[in-house]
Image: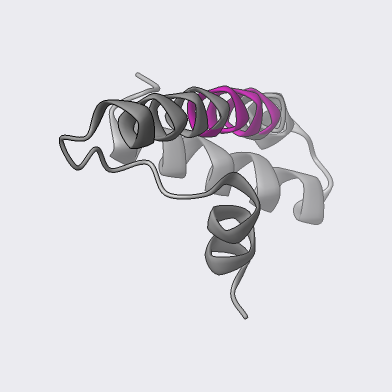
Amino acid sequence: MTYEEIVMKLIGPVMPIGETNTDQNRFESLKHLCELVDRLVFTIDSVIPNKNRPEASMKKAGEYADKFLTDLGIQD
């Protein structure tokens, strides 16, 4: 199983289907997924300052995080 499959199995479906009771549950799942993504983006963002470090491994991680968020349009 991939990380995505595991997370989605834990959170549950998020796509509404047009049935009120089901869609209420799916909306709650969507909110949980959004909260998780927000925390994950915050964690990735916290690695970015390392791009200015002299240690190669730290610099590499910081640059990778910066490029990832830039490519998503989240980071300038």
| Residue 59: percent from left, percent from top | 70, 44
* Residue lying at the far bottom of the rendered structure: 1
Above or below residue 26? Residue 24 is above
Q: Position of 57 compared to 47: left or right?
A: right
Q: Quadrant of residue 22?
A: top left
Between residues 48 and 59, which one lies in front from this camera angle?
48
Quadrant where the image shows the N terminus: bottom right
Q: Position of residue 37 (x, y in %)?
A: 54, 32
* Residue shown at the point (57%, 28%) measured from the top left: 32
Query: Which x, y percent locates residue 62?
Result: 65, 39
- Identity of the residue drawn at 79% across and 46% down: 58
**Quadrant where the C terminus lies?**
top left
The residue at the point 73 percent across, 32 percent down is 50
Of 13 and 53, nearer the camera is: 13
Q: In screen coordinates, is 51 left or right of 54?
A: left
Residue 69: x percent and y percent?
A: 43, 34
Question: Does the magenta run of residues contain 40?
Answer: yes
- Quick one: which residue is furthest to the left in this view? 18
> Which of the 4 image quadrants contains residue 9?
bottom right
Q: Nearer the viewer, residue 60 or 12?
A: 12
* Residue plotted at (40% across, 35% down): 26
Region of the chain picked out in magenta, as a range? 33-43
* Number of marks present in the image shown: 0
Residue 36 within the segment the image draws in magenta: yes
